[in-house]
Image (spheres, helix red, strand yellow):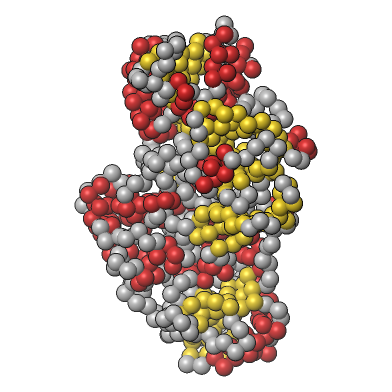
């Protein structure tokens, strides 16, 4: 009977804990039950409910790529009760995970296209999953460009991977920090993401744009993309509405007739334009 | 309804029927006068307790299927290890005795949420183990509007047994399902064959007050009219009493409770009327003011659910209007929406 309980999480062991930035950590999680780990499958864009027993559950995307088997990763900022408890855990400790939930980025439909990733701050993790997924299947795509901005150099996440992407010859990486957030040896751009995007002036021809960031960044970036000629149907984002159940029951992430947890979190700008702006 | 068999039951046979239900091992949940709080409440009926079939209950029998707080996970700590313990599913055969047609109809909305794949084990087991005995309404008050939302004071939708008074001392019993039939078979001697009876003689009259189709149409145009929603919700305190007493509302929160030995995860009633319901970790809130939360309540029940599930998320029981401490009358608000000039 227990197996049928949709609220029952997998038990996961923290294999690696990485300090990404002030208040931000990444956990690599392994399934305590090996069989569950072998059978576990997900696709880029999906999310889960991560829990600390006795504290509660929090919703994060799966930040690792489905092409990297045997583990999942999540990146979170310490904000409330659950994330504070998560941040206090160490390698070897146990957490809960329910998922994968939600819809996916349609990577299969994007074969032969250019991919333009635009991310701000702690919103790189959902795109990082897609970036690695695309890079692991690099031959399926044409140009891959990444624009990533944060408030300051310290706030950038996955710094080690930014270096890795930068050194690859097949990714065009642009990093930027808000004015005042640069350090003396900062070699990237200084400026807000929408402004830097405008300066980059990427071609919208045969290109899919994926945008994740704080609401204000998304709000100011979408008009730039429109100006560059990106069609609303080719512009993708993920909504980050508050969730509890993740399976379309608790009612929290309801936007219009949609539940972000089952109908999303991945939406095109075209879809968002047909929904109330309650996200 | 798959089957209808008709019987008669004497009023004096209700107590013997309840006794037979209890002797069969069934838990009985029925309306009773509360010792402490005013009004009539649905709760466990003990051997000496008296059923109150006259009054409308303050809260619907929703909690028989979706308890206010339910444990959905239990674990224990073994050193640093977490060990899952089995889920404690409540599946004792239960009879909700003395539900009203509106409350019984509302189970469809709960089914749509909790039986929809992936189903909620706890709800499903309770629902499967529970028989619903509904009594037709003999009176209605100005807050009732079941007939405006596809229901009615003698609506059998969702009932296993529907009892309708047809004489001072007799009820017509309509056996709607197999579960209902099993109740009759527990004490067949209490039931008499039913001939021709006037089913409407004692049934309340509830006038149709608005068209939900019209409301839904207006809502599509009214969504962005901030001033309209501000006026509609000016009195709203955001206390969520409306959701608490609502037989349809089923939004929930998940919270953990623990001590050093272990703990449990709980599914708890919640409401879209609460600011915290949608507050992001970043501090951003998609529904940051009360008028947006009131609009969500109305939109969900009268626009989103009809579009998604083909049902209105309101059965017109009127409880929210009666219970609101700020006199936010739902019927008045809906009539205003139906009549809004856009």
Task: Please tell me which residue lies in front, B244 or B130.
Answer: B244
Tell me the residue at 34%/46% (across/down).
B288
Q: Is residue B138 above or below residue A77?
A: below
Q: Is residue A97 left or right of residue B342?
A: right
Tell me the residue at 47%/49% (across/down).
A252
Tell me the residue at 42%/47% (across/down).
B278
Q: To which quarter of the image does residue B57 belong?
A: bottom left
Tell me the residue at 32%/53% (across/down).
B290
Q: Is residue A204 left or right of residue A75?
A: left
Is residue B286 among the parts visible in the rendering? yes
Q: To which quarter of the image does residue B128 belong?
A: bottom right
Q: Is residue B158 above or below residue B16?
A: above
Task: Please tell me which residue lies in front, B239 or A89.
Answer: A89
Q: Is residue B342 left or right of residue A242?
A: left
Q: Is residue B21 above or below residue B298?
A: below
**How many numbered marks, from 0 up?**
0
Is residue B192 among the parts visible in the rendering? no
Q: Residue furthest right?
A: A35
Q: Position of residue B89 (x, y in %)?
A: 68, 62
Q: Residue furthest front?
A: A184
Q: Position of residue A271 (x, y in %)?
A: 43, 33
Q: Quadrant of the N terminus of chain A?
A: bottom right
Q: Is residue B114 left or right of residue B240?
A: right
């Amino acid at each position: 009977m227990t197996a049928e309980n949709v609220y029952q999480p997998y038990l996961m062991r923290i294999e690696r804990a990485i300090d990404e930035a002030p208040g931000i950590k990444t956990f690599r999680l392994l399934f305590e039950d090996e069989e569950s780990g072998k059978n576990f499958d997900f696709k880029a864009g999906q999310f889960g409910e991560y829990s600390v027993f006795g504290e509660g559950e929090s919703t994060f995307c799966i930040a690792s790529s489905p092409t990297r088997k045997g583990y999942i990763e999540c990146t979170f900022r310490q904000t409330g009760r659950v994330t504070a408890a998560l941040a206090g855990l160490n390698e070897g400790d146990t957490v809960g995970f329910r998922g994968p939930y939600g819809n996916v980025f349609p990577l299969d439909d994007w074969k032969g296209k250019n991919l333009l990733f635009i991310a701000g701050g702690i919103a790189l993790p959902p795109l990082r999953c897609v970036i690695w997924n695309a890079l692991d299947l690099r031959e399926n795509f044409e140009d891959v460009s990444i624009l990533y901005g944060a408030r300051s150099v310290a706030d950038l996440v996955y710094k080690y991977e930014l270096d890795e992407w930068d050194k690859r010859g097949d990714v065009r990486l642009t990093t930027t920090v808000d004015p005042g957030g640069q350090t003396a040896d900062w070699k990237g751009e200084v400026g807000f993401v929408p402004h830097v995007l405008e300066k980059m002036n990427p071609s919208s021809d045969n290109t899919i744009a994926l945008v994740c960031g704080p609401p204000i960044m998304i709000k100011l970036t979408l008009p730039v993309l429109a100006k560059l000629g990106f069609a609303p149907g080719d512009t993708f984002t993920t909504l980050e509405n508050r969730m509890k159940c993740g399976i379309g029951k608790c009612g929290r992430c309801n936007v219009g007739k949609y539940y972000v947890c089952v109908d999303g979190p991945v939406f095109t700008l075209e879809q968002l334009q047909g929904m109330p702006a309650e996200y | 309804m798959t089957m209808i068999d008709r019987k008669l039951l004497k009023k004096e046979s209700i107590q013997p029927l309840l006794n037979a239900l209890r002797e069969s091992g069934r838990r009985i949940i029925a309306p009773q006068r509360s010792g402490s709080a005013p009004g009539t409440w649905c709760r466990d009926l003990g051997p000496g307790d008296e059923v109150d079939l006259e009054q409308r209950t303050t809260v619907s029998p929703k909690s028989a299927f979706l308890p206010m707080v339910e444990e959905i996970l239990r674990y224990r700590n073994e050193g640093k290890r977490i060990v899952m313990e089995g889920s404690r599913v409540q599946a004792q055969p239960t009879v909700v005795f003395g539900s009203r047609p509106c409350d019984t109809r509302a189970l469809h909305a709960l089914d749509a949420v909790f039986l929809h794949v992936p189903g909620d084990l706890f709800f499903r087991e309770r629902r499967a183990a529970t028989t619903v005995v509904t009594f037709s309404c003999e009176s209605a008050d100005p807050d009732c509007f079941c007939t405006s939302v596809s229901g009615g004071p003698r609506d059998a939708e969702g009932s296993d047994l529907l009892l309708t008074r047809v004489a001072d001392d007799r009820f017509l019993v309509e056996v709607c399902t197999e579960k209902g039939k099993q109740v009759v078979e527990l004490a067949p001697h209490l039931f008499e064959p039913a001939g021709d009876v006037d089913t409407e003689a004692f049934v309340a009259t509830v006038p149709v007050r608005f068209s939900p189709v019209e409301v839904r149409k207006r809502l599509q145009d009214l969504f962005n009219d901030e001033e309209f929603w501000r006026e509609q919700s000016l009195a709203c305190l955001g206390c969520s009493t409306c959701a608490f007493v609502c037989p349809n509302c089923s939004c929930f929160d998940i919270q953990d409770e623990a001590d050093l030995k272990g703990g449990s995860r709980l599914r708890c009633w919640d409401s879209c009327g609460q600011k915290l319901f949608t507050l992001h970790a970043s501090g951003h809130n998609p529904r940051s003011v009360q008028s947006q939360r009131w609009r969500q309540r109305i939109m969900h029940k009268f626009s989103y659910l009809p579009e998604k599930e083909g049902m209105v998320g309101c059965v017109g029981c009127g409880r929210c209007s009666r219970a609101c401490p700020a006199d936010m009358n739902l019927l008045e608000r809906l009539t205003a929406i139906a009549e809004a000039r856009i």
